[in-house]
Image (tube, rainbow, N blue to C red):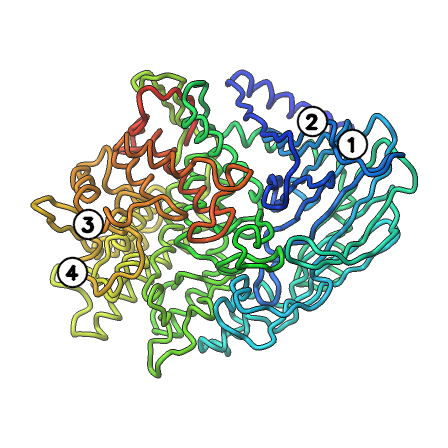
Amino acid sequence: MLRNFLIFLFSVFAFIANAENNHLYIPDSYSWTTQSKNSSESMPCGGGSIGLNVWVENGDILFYVQRSGAFDENNTMLKAGRFRLQFFDENGKIEGQRVFKQTLNLYSSEMKINMDDINTVISVDVFNPLIQVKFYSPKPVKAVISYESWRYKDRLIRKMEFQQCSYKFGKVPNLMTKADSIVPDKHSILFYHQNPDSTVFDATAWEQGLQDCRKEMFNPIGKLISGGKMVCPDFRLTAKHNAIYASTDYVSWQFETQKAIKRTAIYIALGDTQDGLDAFNSQINETLRHNKKADYQHSITWWHSFWQRSYIKTESKDNAKLAQMVRNYTLFRYMLGCNAFGKWPTKFNGGLFTFDPVYVDPKYPFTPDFRRWGGGTFTAQNQRLVYWPMIKSGDYDMLRSQLDFYARLLPTGMLRSKVYWGHGGAYFNEQIENFGLPNIDEYGKKRPSGFDPGVEYNAWLEYTWDTALEFCGIALAASNAGATISELSPKAGTAISGSSKAMSFDVSPYIPLIKQCLRFFDEHYQWQAKRLGRKALDGDGHLIIYPGSGCETFKMAYNPASTIAGLAFVSKALCDYLIRTNSDSDTIAVYKAIEKRIPEIPTRYINGHKTIAPAVTWARINNRELPQLYPVFPWHLYGVGHDSLQTAINTWLYDPYVKQFKGVTSWEQANIFAADLGLTDEAAELNYEKLKDGPYRFPAFWGPGHDWAPDHNWGGSGMIGLQEMLLQFDKSNKPIIKPAWPNDWLVKFKLE
């Protein structure tokens, strides 16, 4: 034990010494000196796979707890509960009227609350699902810690409340959120939600003609148990009462110290399993048995290392816009870091940090579990914006939650291609469930007889299945990333760059996924062409991408630019990888042939200017996305350092849909396009609009926009835009420093 401890200390000191030699970056802490009005004025805190919303209201320290993967039988993403800590002295309740400060220490991921000299520290273990709440006071005080649950009873899901689960807009009579099991003891309380064997997974499979294949498909929610246990040795259960917070009634189990004390610790362990209650209890107990002090130090070391991977900082005191953008970029990157090792991706519609929905919109007077656009439903067009920025920020380990999502579903994707169309490849649609099928409501409950069972009967989603290519692209792009550093300077010419990697990304686990995604498009559109006509390819030997879809916007499209650019990037990058890793010649030949069958990106002339077209042709417009600029981002086939820059700029300037749809709300990405086109003034203004303070007290809580609050694809697209202003790569993959950065904006950064 001593030897291991000494090795650990040596590792910590070696890391610190090395960081100091390389200009250690320590992000500024973020503080409030007044208490909050309600949960919408909460601060995020977390780690590993757990997020907390922490706020102090009328002297009570409150926090919600949410862990990645806590899905119920309807696929609502459940919070573990709400916790409330109160302090009392001989004069009654201590409310922090004299001294108050709440601080998020980003560098170590700790929430520190000072309230009339009582210091509370809340932290989350990165590597074990454990929350620690500690307080110390110069004078003895009494304390009460309460566990509060609104799932103490079955709850009927109301009309608009269906949006929190996978039944979405459907109206299922008498659908319930079932009650949790809550088991208090003298010094602890166990709480968990246990799903039945039959869930929305089964209903979805039956609806989509896959009922006989259920045992072959990944089912993450059948018999799932999720929840946790609070242990408070210095407290004793003293009361249970009913109350209301925001718009929701709840039951509170209160634990009180039996005497005044100066310090104590409270532990909350979380777990989930599909292997039964005994396995769940074993998980919880194993977490509680861990060496908490050593784990705490391990977590701090991880966070310190996290902040050295990349950063953007400014010391410009007179540029308030820049300072706000950089601060909010940093705060949002921290929020993403709180789900670094979650089994499930950080959701675009609130991540782990949603709060009472009535404070987002009074039309939603529902429980704290509510969020729009579902809990177990993943909208890929939005999710991608949460994960693209992790490449330049060097957070490769955090990519795995999203990439593993698709890798787990690969057998289901291949099964669907085979069952529906009889060909190979893996098919992943938009609005995909955590079990790999289309959302039960978006699939279409009023499908006409004979309609293709593999296509969603939905005006937005029909033939929208190219977003999986972006996650293939993310994996391939991450495997080629390096490090670039620019020193603080108003002049772009003084920047320096290097190619050393702080961390490498192994793409090999995702190569089967990438191969099958390409195979799907190649085989499906040859199958489709032969179904509609005599030949599998066009006159030039290229695929005929029809019916296709330019995002959710340009529908019934022929050769949409977004799909073709994605296929071109992924096929070339895959072939480069196969050659680099000395794959067998037959495999290389297969994917080289697919690469050759990809059509050219469509173009058109507008007022005499050559532009990228959304598609060769399309039948209607259904949304406000800009697939004609996807060859710019995310695929970087056009842009700064490429021969085709002027064509892309013409698209920005003259395309009527670009003029109409370019915006910065939620997933809108005009800020990214402007940066990637080298349009400095527009990029600066649009990225400020994207990254300026959100409407809630914590400035990186954006939304609800098109989605929900806090809007994570809003923050992700803001991160991307700022990164692209600072660093791009030309067609030879050489770095271009500050391609869209104002010369008088002082900044220092490290990006990959």
The label on residue 1 is 1
Q: Is residue 659 left or right of residue 498?
A: left
Q: Tag 1 or tag 3, which sits nearer the N-term?
A: 1
Residue 555 - label: none
Marks 1 and 3: in contact by CB < 8 Å?
no
In the image, residue 506 sits, relative to residue 442, either above or below, namely: above
Residue appearing at x 62%, y 46% in the figure: 39
Q: How many marks?
A: 4
Cα–Cα span, label 3 and label 4: 32 Å
Of the image marks 3 and 4, the number of the one nearer the N terminus = 4
User: What SS does tag 4 mark?
Assistant: loop
- Mark drawn on residue 7: 2
Q: Is residue 4 visible?
A: no
> Relative to 748, is 111 on the left or the right?
right
Frontmost residue, 553 versus 708: 708
Coordinates of residue 253 in the picture (x, y in percent): 80, 54
What residue does disc 4 label?
541
Say whether marks 2 and 4 touch (CB < 8 Å): no
Mark 1 neighbour class, 10 Å CA radius: few under 14, some 14 to 19, many 20 or more: few
